[in-house]
Image (cartoon, helix red, strand yellow):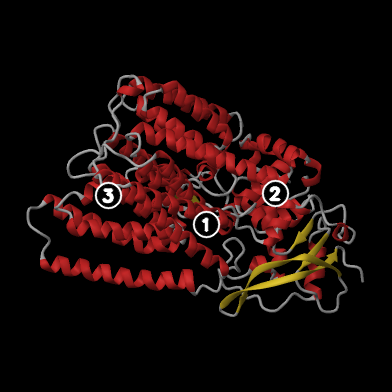
Amino acid sequence: MFPQKYPVVETKDIPKVVVDVSEGGSCTEKPSRLSLILLLLILWLVTRPYEGILWDSEYYTVQALHFLWPDRYANDLYFAFGSQDQFSIFSRIYGPAIASLGLAHAHIALTLLTQLAWVSGLVYLAKGMFQEKWAYLAMAGVIVFPGSAGLVFHYGEPILTPRILAEALTLVALGAIWRERIFFSLGLLGVGTVIHPLMTLPGIVFWFLWFFGRKKTGWWACALAGTIVLGLAASGVQPFVRLTQPFDPVWLNIVHQRSPYCFISQWGMGEWSAVIHTVLLTLWAMQKAGNKERPFLKLALLIGVGGIVLSWLGGDLLKNVLILDAQLWRAMWMVSLISHLFIAQRLITLFHDPRSYHARWLWMGAFLLTLLAGFHGGFYLLATPLMAVAFLVQQWEERTPEPLPLWGRWLVASFFLVVFFQTAFFFWNTFILDTVRGETAHVLLIEFVFTLGALMLMSLSFKESCAGFSTKSSVRIRFGMINLLLLGSLMVWDQRSPWIKSIDEASGPPSDLSKILPQGRPIYWEGDLTVPWFLLRRSSYFSCSQGTGSLFSRETAINYWQRYRSFQPLHTVEFSEGNTYCAPLPGEKISGPPTQGQVEKVCRENLGLGGMVLLHSIEGMHPKIWNSPIPFTYLKSIGHSKRWVTADRFYIYGCPIQK
């Protein structure tokens, strides 16, 4: 399983994957580098649009603001008992950028810079493994296909977090490992560790096993490192002390409810479909890989699958705090990325193998569904079974001289048709009829069309160049189409809603709002945590998102759960059906708008609460009202369906309630 030790050699002497794209041999003429770069840029823009500060980017942004103004956020639930910021230096980069450029400009600047760093890391890795211009095909596979780690996290995310920067350093480190640059790669991984240790950890394990997996001295060094870790744990040093701590039942139940994706036993069909998809793809890539590529893929797969197994053993079974916190299953991001590098190479080989007639079309269908999974994770449920069938059919066609039996062909054709009609139905409902996504669904459809267009232009460029019938007029037409696609991609790249844009770009809190808000204590703002955090620059008392720290801190978990149970009867937007973090608990039915008695009870139970800003007025109460110049749009559950609702009036209730 471990690779043989390769001698340290000059970069120019390292073998690269040779992609044969023509029946007669290698291409002597290749598309222009500018066209390929523009096509990769288009693919990046349409698969990673800019949506502002949202999702996990909210946590890292408020950590940067807390770094600048700790007193303003001292009473926030997210910081009151410690935060994840203690494990990363990212706020030391992000905070000064906000102070210099302002929040909106700092966020978009760092988003672009970290994405540029990520792409640069990908270029370094791909160009080390593949021939000069064929590396672009490998990079296209990485960019367009979703790099899922159990559906929750993806490589190369469009949001600003330290994860993408740590991934960038890990990619460069993998490229250095391929080139046998032992100390350079180790240094990069060391920097990545202080930016985001969880995302860098798979790269560190890869580095150790690649260089020292077959050396006794390496394992002695590993044993020494383990002894040091145990000593630090016994001495109470964070985070190593967590290795000696199990989750108690109360804490564990809270984490189960708030972050079920951290438990392997809680994964559903979607998560397992994504994992099996990656495993099948890696095995497929290994079949035709060279003497150095195969160990590279094997080792990545070992680390990814091993991370899932260790997460299940240490987290689900042993309930160990450190192992559950480490989320070792995230190592699948690295497996997914490395396997995606080989997609173009394997497809080209497949289409020039006369034995794999049926398999090639099954693989094409599987990859089309995988491409769709990047826009909606549900397509994994169709892509993975089709990929499994393609894998089996290819094994038959390549390993046996007999053609696929008639019954086998009928079975494959029937399965393919079933998947086709299911895909058409799912596609129509997701991109055309989806009333929940609204206009967003149509934007996704445009992005999907642009992605297909860019991929077709890239494949056409290579085909014409390699066949030798590329003309000046065809090149000019193709280049014009590339520029049109680029223009369209730039037009749809900024997808911030007017509400998000107003929050991100605000220079300060609106004066008319500040005058009527309770002062001195944290507030609760229904529906959008970013208003107190980014618009008002003050502490938030409660939101479902703030419970993310429950995994890392028992005090945060207990306080979060107390507030959760207190606010739940109000049936605010956070507690709507389908909300991953704050859905009603099994067996609980919450109906009707909140009453005056419920609001007063929340104020009595939460003495640190300064007030509540709700989306609805409470009968019998007299709130202060703020009319927002920008309407707030949120998803509301109505019966068994959901629809978008717009509100521009916010009702402010101070605590304690004045009779």
**Disc nearest the viewer among 1 and 3:** 1
Q: Earlier in the sequence, mark 1 or mark 3?
A: 3
Q: Are marks 2 and 1 in contact (CB under 8 Å)?
A: no
- On the image, the x and y values in percent for residue 429 come to 46, 73
Disc 1 secondary structure class: helix
How far separated are the C-alphas under marks 2 and 1?
A: 40 Å
Label annotation for residue 78: 2
Q: For mark 2, does the 10 Å Cα neighbourhood hold few (<14), some (14 to 19), or many (20 or more) residues?
A: many
Residue closest to the eye, 430 or 614: 430
Quadrant containing the C terminus is bottom right
- The answer to which of marks 2 and 1 sits earlier in the sequence is 2
Instruction: Check disc 1 and give the amino acid type.
Output: Gly
Q: Which residue is mark 1?
A: 488
Q: Which residue is at 52% across, 67% downward?
A: 441
Q: Quadrant of the N terminus?
A: top left
Please, what secondary structure does the residue beneath circle 2 have?
loop
Q: Disc number at residue 318?
A: none
**Disc assigned to residue 347:** 3
